[in-house]
Amino acid sequence: MRAQLAARRWQRPARGVVVMHNGPLTAAQRPWTALLSCAPGAALGGLTALEFDGFEGFLDEVPTVVLPGGADRPTYQAVHVHWSTRLGSSDVHPLRQPRRTRSQRSLLDAASWSRFERRARTVILAGVQQRVVSMLEKNLAPGGWLFIAHSESLNGIEHSMQNVAPAVFRKTRRLTRSRDIEPSLPRRGPVRLQRARSASQSVRTIRSISTAPPSASAVTPTVVRAGSLPGAKCRAYSAFTAA
């Protein structure tokens, strides 16, 4: 490692952080470098944390890190730091990596750290809108319809619904369960488990099918109306509760 660093094939942007190339840090490496250069217990916050959670429309060019109260400022320069005494499990997700504040906390922090009131309102509204669209799509049955006002738009919001008309969206139907297909379809033949020995005499299992799978023309999906199946999801979702 020392030889690579001395030859400048690798770089050390901060103490305890080694990057195995000598070029500019990528967008994925900058937040990690900023976080690892800070004191233990620090977490990504604001727009930087929201970007890892799928928030779109706002780009935080310089990573933002929330430090525990009383922690020293890192020597790494390319980072925005804030201090907080509330970095417990209720504010920081204990499992997600890189370590970052929860989405609700990150959204409020990003708005409160904005220099202008208009930008703070825009951040809050964008976060609520993207959350609402995500919940609507999640609770919409496959093949269901979503109607929005003509003054509204879903541009810039990630979703998998198909825009079939102005202000009209439909969730693409996917056959992911066996009950979505007619039971009279031809089935594959029985599956045999055979045992074979490789050159190293280690035993492995080979899965073989005795008959060929049915042709694509034989598969006919059944038209199932949303709500007709037990436990089916509703076609529309009108209530939203912030998590």
Image: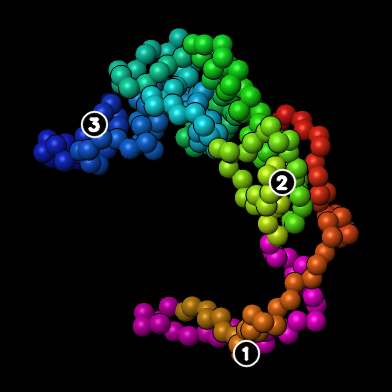
- Span colored in magenta: 174-202
Q: What type is the residue that disc 3 sits on?
A: Arg
Residue at 56%, 11% in the rendered image: 117
Dominant secondary structure (helix, strand or loop) of the stretch shown in magenta: loop
On whether residue 104 falls in the magenta region, the answer is: no
Q: Amino acid at mark 2?
A: Val
Across and down, in percent, residue 181 comes to 76, 72
| Residue found at x 80% / y 67% | 223
10 Å crowding of disc 2: few (<14), some (14-19), many (20+): some
Instruction: Look at label 1 and name its amino acid.
Output: Thr
Distance from the alpha carbon under mark 1 to that under mark 2? 44 Å
Q: CA distance from mark 3 to mark 2?
A: 52 Å
In the image, taking residue 161 as reference, residue 239 lies left or right, namely right
Residue under numbered circle 1 = 211
Q: From what the image shows, is residue 70 above or below residue 13?
A: above
Q: Between 159 and 26, which is closer to the camera in this rendering?
A: 159
Which sits earlier in the primary sequence, circle 3 or circle 1?
3
The image quadrant that residue 103 belongs to is top right
Q: Is label 2 in a helix, a strand or a loop?
A: strand
Whichever of callouts 3 and 2 sits on the residue coming sooner in the sequence is 3
- Image location (x, y in percent) of residue 25: 29, 35
Residue wearing tag 2: 168
- Which residue position is annotated with label 3? 12
Q: Is residue 109 visible?
A: no
Quarter holding residue 53:
top right
**Circle nearer the N terminus (1, 2):** 2
